Amino acid sequence: LASPAHGARTRVGAHTPGRRDARAVPNVRGMQLREAVRTLHRAGFRVQLAAATGAASDTWPHAGAMLREGSLVRLVSDR
């Protein structure tokens, strides 16, 4: 894939084919684990569960962190 020529103008938010765009990790704190996993998948992330019951208490990286699509997010439960 060719990069834009030096000095070329591109639109803010323009998509570059073949590039995985960065996106924010959603805040899933307090959601039931099933809902939290769905939310993270829909946002384009892979999910690793630290426990299989309860509600989501945190993620690593934390909510708001910018990651590439397909990155792994660890989901921690409150139990």
Image (cartoon, helix red, strand yellow):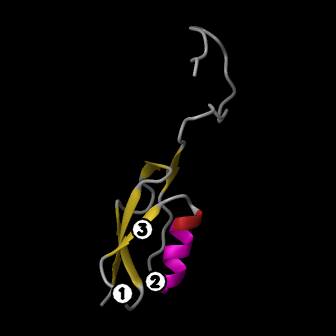
Magenta extent: 30-40
Amino acid type, residue under disc 3 in the picture: Val
Q: Earlier in the sequence, mark 3 or mark 1?
A: 3
Give the x, y percent position of residue 22.
50, 45
Task: Depth check: give the residue in front, 32 or 63.
Answer: 32
Name the dominant secondary structure of the magenta segment.
helix
Amino acid type, residue under disc 2 in the picture: Leu
Alpha carbon separation for disc pair 2 and 1:
8 Å
Could you say whether the residue bearing mark 3 is in a helix, strand or loop? strand
Q: Is residue 53 left or right of residue 42?
A: left
Amino acid type, residue under disc 1 in the picture: Ala
The answer to whether residue 62 is above or below residue 66 is below
Residue corresponding to mark 3: 47
Quadrant of the image occupied by residue 48: bottom left
Q: Is residue 60 left or right of residue 35?
A: left
Give the x, y percent position of residue 41.
54, 66
Residue corresponding to mark 2: 33
State if disc 1 and disc 2 touch (CB < 8 Å). yes
Give the x, y percent position of residue 11.
69, 27
Task: Depth check: give the residue in front, 20 or 22.
Answer: 20
The answer to whether residue 17 is above or below residue 50 is above
- Quarter of the picture containing the N terminus is top right
